[in-house]
Image (cartoon, rainbow, N blue to C red):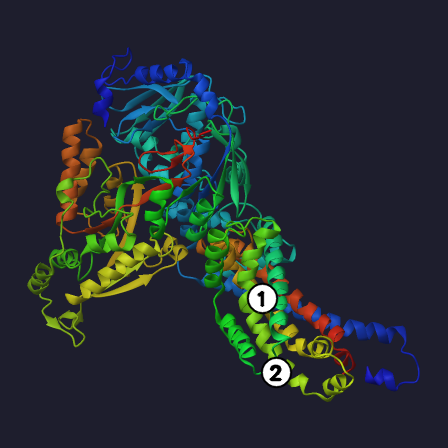
Amino acid sequence: MMSLSSNRAEPSPGYGRRSISAGLFAAAALCSIITPAAAAEDDKRGGIIRYGHYQEPPCLYAGWVQAGYIQRQYADNLVARTHDGQIVPWLATDWSISEDNLTYVFKIKPGVTFHDGTVLDAKAIVTNFERWLSNDPDKVNRNGKLYIGEYIRSVTAPEPLTLKIELARPYQPFLTVLSTYFFGILSPTALERGPKELCEHPVGSGPFAVETWNHGQNVILKRNPNYNSAPATAKHQGPAYVDGIVWKFLKDSTVRYGSLVAGESDAIYDIPAVDWADAQKRFKVIQDITGGTPTRLQLNTARPPFDDVRVRRAFAYVAERRKAVEVSFQGSIPFNANGALSISTPEHLKDLADSYPYDPDRANRLLDDAGWTARSRDGIRTKDGKRLTVRLLYAGGSLITPDGVSVLQILQDQARSAGFDIVLKPIPQADWFAGKGRGIDDYEAQPAYWVASSAEILKISWRPDQNGVINANNASRFQPPELWTLIEEADRTFDDKVRLRLYEDAQRVIVDNAAVVGLFPLTVSIASQPKLKDIWISSRVSEPVFHDAYFEK
Amino acid sequence: MSAAGRSALAPGPVVIWRRWLGPTVRRLLGAIAVFWAVASFTFCIQALLPGDRAELILNVAAGTFTQPTAAELAKVNAKYGFDAPLVVQYLRYLGGLVQGDLGASYQSHRPVLHIIAEQVPPTIGLTLSALLLGWIIAIVLTVPTAGRHDPLSRAVASFQVAAAVAPPYWIGSILLVVLAVKLRLVPVEGGSGLSGVALPALALAIPLSGFIGQVIREEFARVLDQPFVISARMRGMSDLGVRLLHVLRHAVLPGITLSGWALGALFSGAAVIETVFARPGLGGLLVAATSARDVPLVTGIIVASAGMYIIANLLVDIAYPIIDPRIKAS
């Protein structure tokens, strides 16, 4: 993703090699403000968007993506990322990276203030970094720390509008990670008011400010009339066109879609599969496939029967996964065979998009080879008197939707014909977060996904256990040294071609070993009334963006 | 009462005081005991559930699974006092409860009392409207049809049986699609106005009306055969008049008893209905708090609901003698 940026690179005095200029974008932005289109811009002004969202977060500032959707409206990030993976200016108008890839110097946009009037300068950003990496549970951004904690050596503000970040080791995905919602910059003044105020009234510099949170109903977001820090990915600079957003929580899909049909909402999140076809006809539908890992079954390679790669492969061949996904989601979500990365991730290896097609004969042969030859009276295969049982644990209702569970049920049924006994075990979300069912001996398979921008997710999924700290995200327990070597090397390689090849090799190791079996990516869909224009979905974590949206008059 | 009646002298103030005090104190002590039991039970359940609370708090806040380090866990344990022995935690919790301090939510960090106070009014509004609506439907359907065996009356009786067993969630979804989405008679989203409460209240009221209707229908049929009913008819009173003025009063008594239970059932039904209709309220809050296992919040909601349940049953006890003075005499 750096290649596209470096094509336009201009040498800058301090740090030569990969200085990335924002000139083009700034020029484009300026043009859009001072062209005669200004009159047309006025036509776009006004109105309040009634947006029907899904879940209500318990806190408006958290690592969870449900809070991230709102954070995208009230906060700005240092940099933004386009859908094809370029890093473009946001609060940082320009930046340079030193020869050794260890020092980043950012020029911060002048004249930006937070909603509470606090000046957004390099010092304010340093405060944010200090909190993210803090050891205090009330301050730390665990999600963010997981990505960048080990790399950061220092974050300083040598000048009011110059931010300097020194890394301990080169980390190529650094800017990509900084573009994700959980690195939104908040007002240091507001941060001082403690965790309660941070949850209720987070203060950023974004196009909308949090006005009130009517718990159980909605969050009222008000237009920031002084907004001057839109990312280069935005369709226009300057304040939002609409006066605000009523961000409603409509958890039930009948109500959510019904509210759009009845005209009580201008836009809704997540179109239910049953209404997918209808929505295409009546409304404007946009959909984005999130990056990172798709929902995939992680097979526990640390214990039988999946410690044998033949059994894992047999399990992958045994079911018509593509068909199961198509049937369960009624065509609203694509199939994602390559379980290592989501199909929308730029580094996703297409060669693996057809891995392990439905092939029951092959599955049966593999199981015979692996010694699972005997059958119990109910047709389940056995070996040394042990049944071929797969306990498939999932956090139902939250991390996997009812439609997703229906995919699992189809798999369960088909795998049975080859002699697998699949036991579906739903675990409540809270128990899941508390660690229940995640012990190494508690399961044979677990579905999970993790939304991210690109292949930087591989580090999170496949980091081996270190010093007794178990990587809870590696539920496959698959940690051959060569895989980690590939990922670590890719993450520190700045040559795009070489890095891509390393990421691809890593995907091959994961898929060839059937450590995970791909199912479907997480998608974000928005349906809106035809008169509401220009809502877009940001890359790749897929938050809806309302800054450019306007009502056609 | 009977002792006082036999005495020729009027009872002295002390006797009256004692007579009033006795049952009241007993009732209050009973209520406190129930409170204590509910609070202790909730505490035990939450403390004994599998999994580590500190790990849960960290993971819910981050929205991800991570394996926190021992140092990170220790900080959270110290902050919330989980490092103290369970007995100490329990006593601290009871101490807070006595002072009206339910603690702060793990997730939003706001005082639990504020969060609950904010969500109680919509739930009370919903349950009371549902109760009222349930009674209206039950009486309208039962009074003209009880004790009759024509096809219409039998159809109504069967409808009440079906209504009683229908899950509110299902009724709610059907009402929503038909009345709100297709016919546009009421708004799809609940909202706080009168039109907003109509559908969710109806969804809760229909099964309840089935229960109440069945209970009063039997009693109604029994009372219809009583001598005083026959004598009222002989006085030339119309059938509807007899049913409304004489029989109904007797027949509603078992329904009133049921209403005390119904308030509790409506509270739990509200949890689902509030989520379906996107209404604010205690029910939706409880669902969210439980799924994140926000212990102080869950505990607070359960204790608050228990309180309201106790109050509802006290009201039923008071309502009884007003409707049937014979109860006061006995």
Q: Secondary structure at mark 2?
A: loop
Instruction: Using the numbered discs, state the Cα–Cα distance from disc 1 to disc 2 in whole angstroms.
Output: 30 Å
Q: Which mark is residue B97?
A: none
Camera-side residue: A93 or A246? A246
Where residue A137 appears, as percent x and y from the top left, is 44, 42
Where residue A236 appears, as percent x and y from the top left, is 39, 23
Q: How many other residues sit within 10 Å of disc 2, few (<14), some (14-19) or many (≥20)?
A: some
Going by the numbered disc 1, the residue's amino acid type is Gly
Q: Which residue sits at x=63%, y=61%?
A: B128
**Vertically, is B309 above or below A261?**
below
Q: Which residue sits at x=44%, y=46%?
A: A261
Residue linked to disc 1: B264
Q: Secondary structure at mark 1?
A: helix
Residue linked to disc 2: B147
Camera-side residue: A340 or A249? A249
Q: How many other residues sit within 10 Å of disc 1, few (<14), some (14-19) or many (≥20)?
A: some
Q: Please identify the quarter of the rendering in which residue A39 is found.
A: top left
Where's the N terminus of chain B, which quadrant?
A: bottom right
Q: Which residue sits at x=14%, y=47%?
A: A354
Tell me whether the residue at label 1 lies in contact with that at label 2, contact meaning CB atoms closer than 8 angstroms. Answer: no
Where residue A496 appears, as percent x and y from the top left, is 18, 28
Determine whether, in the image, residue A523 is placed left or right of residue B120: left
Q: Please identify the quarter of the rendering in which residue A174 is found.
A: top left
